[in-house]
Amino acid sequence: MISLSLLLFLPRYSNSQVKVELLSGFIYNVKTPLNIQQDGYPDIKFNAKYYSEPFALPPYYDIRFSKWRNNRAWGIQFTHQKIFLENKPHEVQRFSISHGLNELFILRMFKKDQLLYHLGAGLILAHPESTIRNEAFSETGGIYLDKGYYLSGVCLSGTAGYNKTVYKNLFLSLEARITGAWARVPVSNGFASVTNLAFHGLLGLGWAFGVEKNQDLTTSQTLAWHK
């Protein structure tokens, strides 16, 4: 609802089109640095390997609202991503951001020929879960109803995609994406600096509201002159 409301404040044009999309898919996480700082102990620094479990509850999903005009658009995108540490050192019993590594992007979007391109930047709302040196993080506090969600960092994205009409305003979305994220999340008596670089393959459905009119004014005027 917040995303849709924000889009309503974007400039309105008679030849604009609003699209709403829901996607899911697969993620491959590249090894990236992880630094865990805990009071009274040496820092734990290593290259972390994460896995994502995209179809386990809560699933990995992507919601996007965009407003198009003349093959260009502004968009708002919410991505619910999850990461679980795979190569845990002996000091780390558990480390994950599974409820999740939530990314809210502002997008600039373009259409060229049959392909769509998106560039995005935004903020991370993270729900960290960890047990470090047998000290479990409480998973409370944060900015949302004391449920353990923290405004934690920043994110960037680049996407290439393709839309195919299924029936009238319903369309299929196929996308390849790369995301980069940095977050500073709390652990028991300390913090962890998390970086994530991920490749995404997504498939989903969308609905287009309104009709995007790309009428050639010169052609229209020529036809009028011949009448």
Image (cartoon, grey):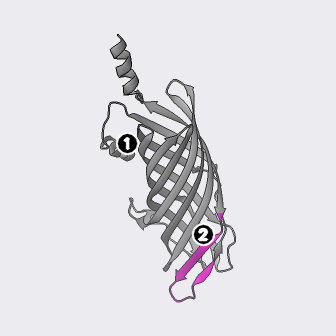
Q: For mark 2, does the 10 Å Cα neighbourhood hold few (<14), some (14 to 19), or many (20 or more) residues? A: many
Outermost residue to the top: 227
Horizontal side of 144 relative to 127 (left or right) equals: left
Q: Amino acid at mark 2?
A: Phe
Q: Main secondary structure of the magenta part?
A: strand
Residue 43 placement: quadrant: bottom right
Q: Return the x and y of residue 191 as percentages of the image width and height.
A: 49, 77
Q: Nearer the viewer, residue 34 or 200?
A: 200
Q: Nearer the viewer, residue 72 or 85?
A: 72
Residue at label 2? 95
Q: Is residue 43 above or below residue 28?
A: below
Q: Return the x and y of residue 206 as percentages of the image width and height.
A: 51, 35
Task: Indicate the secondary structure of the residue bearing disc 1.
Answer: helix
Q: Could you give the CA–CA distance between mark 1 and mark 2, rounded to whole angstroms? A: 34 Å
Marks 1 and 2: CB-CB under 8 Å? no
Q: Is 37 inside the magenta-drawn segment?
A: yes
Q: Amino acid at mark 1?
A: Leu
Q: Return the x and y of residue 167 as percentages of the image width and height.
A: 55, 24
Please report the bounds of the magenta region as a residue range. 30-46
Q: Nearer the viewer, residue 101 or 107?
A: 107
In which quadrant is the N terminus drawn? top left
Nearest to the eye among marks 1 and 2: give it. 1
Query: For the point 60% across and 82% down, which residue is it?
Result: 44
Query: For the point 49% across and 45% down, which residue is it?
Result: 63
First in sequence, mark 1 or 2: give its number.
1
Query: For the point 49% across and 27% down, which residue is it?
Result: 169
Tally of numbered tags: 2
In which quadrant is the C terminus drawn? top left
Residue at label 1? 4
Q: Return the x and y of residue 138 as percentages of the image width and height.
A: 49, 70
Horizontal side of 77 relative to 224 (left or right) equals: right
Q: Is residue 155 above or below residue 22?
A: below
